[in-house]
Amino acid sequence: MLARPEQQGGVIGGQTLAVALAAIPNRRAHVRVHGLLPLLQVCIVLVLMTACGSHGAASAAGTSSGNGLGTPVCTSPGGSPPDTKVAEPSAPHGLFVLAGAQPLTQSQLGPSIQHYLVNNSDVCGGTVFVNWPRVDNGPAANPRYNWSVIDQLIAPWAQAGKIVNLLLNGTGYHGHVLAGVPPWLQPQLQTVTCGTDIAPVYWQAAYVTNWQSYVTAVVQHYASNPNVGYMHVGVGTGAQTLVVGVRNAPCLAGWNAAGYQSQWPLYVQQMIAFAASLHSPKQLIVSFNDYANDPPAAQIAQQDAAAGIGFGFDGLQARDVTGYSSHQPCDQTNWCALYDQYAGKMPLFVQTLYQSYPGPGIGSVTPGIEMTGPLPPLLQTALAVHTQIFELYAQDWLLAFDPSAQGYSQYHAQYVQALGAAAQVVGTAGGAALPTVGP
């Protein structure tokens, strides 16, 4: 893991700064100076916050950690001054809450998100899952699209002057893949069964035509909405570039029978070209996947960069921290090297694999959460390779700011500090501390 700078009695001296500099792994024999800048900044911020007794370390629940002094501003509805601390200053940047697919008034965590996070200045805004069947009533309906579904997801963040990003899901997720396709379309589709999942063959004409029509309509409808930030265009399962089950031999056989080996790479290339053809005033993103790395992440990065499309993945986890700090590739995709290579050519994002696992004392957890590991080193690693968009689970934000969250007494201080340090690089909402209403 990346080392955290030590403190020296509240005084920032040469030795402490040297510790901060030593925490930066030298990934190359000849390292570009700007390639070190994000991690250098976050290390120095951590030193300052610790040694100077910052507002972040001692903040009340529900407040941000920033002090507003020289802090960059993240993406905002009114436009933001360029943040020179990120690689692509004019593109979206900031820390966002993964806020689910339901309006905050209807979701389990919604009241806590509203109370502790919506007005928190370290939170640039929310990232929401947009389920295709809830919006698209089909070509025979008039009106075809129910925009109120998305408007309800945007509303609480817009009222707080924040940004909302849209994850456009092309299907549901594991266990519910076909359920994420509109019911009126399902009978027209060839499908592949993989265990309990039934998934559409994504490259068939009926799916492609209707999916692209829907994405086009969303992009056009929200093109001038100042509270919409960027949009993920799903290519496969959910909002990712993923075919479910292809690492399982029986599932792969079914997909191959449907043309997976030849048609899937062509479909991904086609969807990136389609996204570029929309000339969206909002940043569009097409991700890679670290599950099967097919097509290779390097190929998607090259296509995204050429098309002006954002790039990233939904699987940041503890093994990436270990790989990066030990000068090894970050999983099979070696995404850390790709982020270094394409920094400044397109905005780079990460989403953690699951909510993070800070350590013992938070009850039973799933294996996926344990794989994710603690949040602070994940943020440091992603910043070190120029990530400027972070999609973080609401549970991690609430661990920092909600006193009722399990594990709050043990872990909230380090989570507040880590989030605040990252916000000092990618920007806060207005650059000043904006406390929420107290409990």
Image (tube, rainbow, N blue to C red):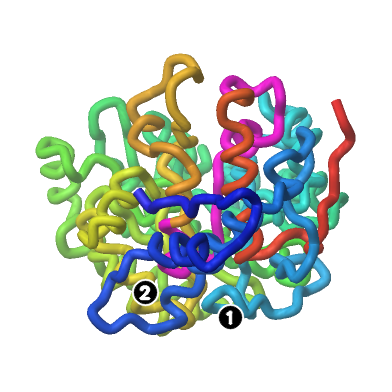
Q: Vertically, is 91 above or below 374?
A: below
Query: Element under label 1?
Result: loop
Q: Please report the residue visible at 39 percent of the width from the left and 49 percent of the height from the top.
A: 316
Look at the image and say whether residue 431 sits in the magenta stretch.
no
Q: Residues within 10 Å of mark 2 (few under 14, many from 20)?
A: some
Position of the C terminus, as image quadrant, is top right
Q: Kindly identify the amino acid type of the residue bearing the numbered disc 1.
A: His
> Pointer 1: what residue?
279
Cα–Cα gap, marks 2 and 1:
26 Å
Horizontal and vertical percent position of residue 413: 63, 36
In this image, 67 relative to 389: left or right? right
Q: Specify start and end residues of the magenta stretch as a single range.
A: 381-407
Q: Nearer the viewer, residue 73 or 2?
A: 2
Q: Please report the residue visible at 34 percent of the width from the left and 78 percent of the height from the top.
A: 341
In this image, 193 relative to 92: left or right? left
Q: Residues within 10 Å of mark 1 (few under 14, many from 20)?
A: some
Horizontal and vertical percent position of residue 432: 82, 59
Of circles 2 and 1, the one toward us is 2
Q: Kindly identify the amino acid type of the residue bearing the numbered disc 2.
A: Asp
